């Protein structure tokens, strides 16, 4: 499900970039922000896993 973006937050994001920022820089910042927002939404909804479960799934040591 898409995360709703507030226009004022988008303006803040653009304004926080340096004058020399590229479109790629902006797209990266949007991607990072969206990824964080999705993670927070998953956490609030209880869609998380314990670290040991994830490590076991991928055969990593605890």
Image (cartoon, rainbow, N blue to C red):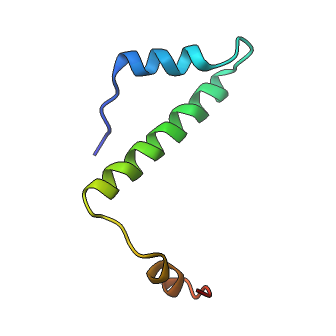
Residue 3 appears at what percent x and percent y?
Answer: 32, 38
In the rendered structure, the answer to whether residue 56 lies left or right of residue 9 reads right
Residue 4 appears at what percent x and percent y?
Answer: 30, 32
> Across the whole image, how many numbered discs are drawn on residues?
0
Quarter of the image where one finds residue 37: top left
Residue located farthest toward the left when viewing the structure as drawn: 45
Residue located farthest toward the right when viewing the structure as drawn: 20
In the rendered view, would you say 43 is above or below 9?
A: below
Seen at 38% across and 73% down, the residue is 49
Front-most of residues 1 and 48: 48
Front-most of residues 53 and 24: 53
Seen at 51% across and 87% down, the residue is 56
In the rendered view, would you say 17 is above or below 35?
A: above
Seen at 28% across and 54% down, the residue is 44
Q: Quadrant of the C terminus?
A: bottom right
In the rendered structure, the answer to whether residue 37 lies left or right of residue 57 reads left
In the rendered structure, the answer to whether residue 54 lies left or right of residue 29 reads left
Seen at 32% across and 49% down, the residue is 41
Residue 58 appears at what percent x and percent y?
Answer: 55, 83
Quarter of the image where one finds residue 27: top right
In the rendered view, would you say 55 is above or below 32?
A: below
């Amino acid at each position: 499900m898409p995360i709703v973006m507030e226009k004022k937050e988008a303006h803040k994001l653009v304004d926080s970039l340096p004058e020399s920022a590229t479109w790629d820089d902006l797209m990266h910042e949007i991607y990072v922000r969206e990824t964080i927002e999705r993670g927070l939404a998953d956490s609030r909804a209880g869609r998380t896993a314990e670290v040991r479960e994830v490590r076991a799934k991928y055969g990593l040591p605890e």
